[in-house]
Image (spheres, helix red, strand yellow):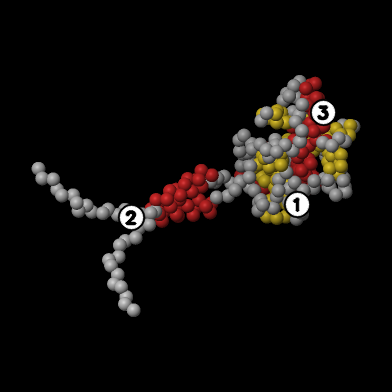
Amino acid sequence: MKIRNSDRREHIVLQMTPMIDIVFQLLVFFVFTFKIVLPEGDFNIRMPSASASESSEPSETPLLKVRLRATPDRELASVQLGDEVLDSGNPFFDLQSRILTLVDDAAGPGSTELEVEIEADYDLKYRYVINAITAVTGYIDNGQQHKLVERVRFAPMAER
Amino acid sequence: MRIRPRGPRGIVEGDLTPMIDMTFQLIAFFMLVINFSDVEQDQRVTLPASELARPPESPYEQPLTIHLTKQDRYIYAGRELTQLAQLRSELLRETQIILRHTSKKLSDVTVIIRADESAKTGIVQEVIQTCQQLEFERFALRGQQSELRTIRARAP
């Protein structure tokens, strides 16, 4: 059998242009639809209106009052748990420590019936309220979240 | 000056392989990070940071999102409102739509409040109060997830 002389191979040129076109189209689509979404999370609170809650269930759960006072420039002036003013350098840490003690005395973390009512000055910056809610609802230890008080609500607003 | 005769031109082929490699890498990256979910975020609002703010385990059935800016303005359904009364009428319209066109109760609706960290607490409370008057009960106070501890020291 005669073997053909294969010296004159045809040079096969792949058409890359359509593929590159499509690839760039895809790239442009993904670049334009890309949006940076910052990770966000929620603190869930259940607050029926005062009239509804009064009629449905009389509150028998122990209620802790947290008061947040504001300075004239809307920063945090003081934190008060019940009648006790937490006036150390880190009031939210103190608040968390007190809540932790109360929860441990009750029934252990996560199973408490405690309810916290937050009363804040009108002009106070909102981030201090979130700090207070964070201090009250739990803490993170060794990367694990421990719950403290799950029921948090705002005090009814005083007439201005 | 004598111009040299040019020889037969060869086809100059650039090596496209690295470019295609790179482009595919980019496409793979964007495909993986793309997020089609309709997250209601607004650049005008800087959320307060909290290490305990975690995304909900399941998406809310019927969420309503109200934004509150540093300048004490309300943003609802993409519209910037200056008066609480305007927000109230918008919410009232929303409640009518929910009651007429869905089988949900207003107490099942979650009102997501995205308030700026420098917003006045009283304004947030007024929004909650307005929602309560319209018979909403569930609220989600939104914060930005933070790895840094907002409560500085470690709990004992």
Question: What residue is shown at x 78% (from left), y 40% (from top)?
Answer: A129
Query: What's the chain of the residue with tag 3?
Result: A
Task: Please give the residue where the numbered disc 1 appears in the rendered image.
Answer: B70
Q: Is residue A62 left or right of residue B40?
A: right
Question: What residue is shown at x 32% (from left), y 75% (from top)?
Answer: B3
Same chain, marks 3 and 1? no
Query: What's the chain of the residue with tag 1?
Result: B
Q: Which one is earlier in the sequence, the residue at label 3 or at label 2?
A: 2
Q: Position of residue B48 (x, y in %)?
A: 73, 43
Q: Amino acid at mark 2?
A: Gln
Is mark 3 in CB contact (under 8 Å) with mark 1?
no
The answer to whether residue B56 shows anywhere in this view is yes
**Circle 3 Cα neighbour tier, 10 Å, few/some/many (<14 / 14–19 / ≥20):** some
Query: What's the chain of the residue with tag 2?
Result: A
Q: Amino acid at mark 1?
A: Lys
Residue farthest to the left, as pictured: A1
Mark 3 → mark 2, Cα distance in angstroms: 73 Å
Q: Is residue A58 above or below residue B121?
A: above
Mark 2 → mark 1, Cα distance in angstroms: 57 Å
Task: Please give the residue where the numbered disc 3 appears in the rendered image.
Answer: A98
Query: SS at mark 1?
Result: loop
Same chain, marks 2 and 1? no
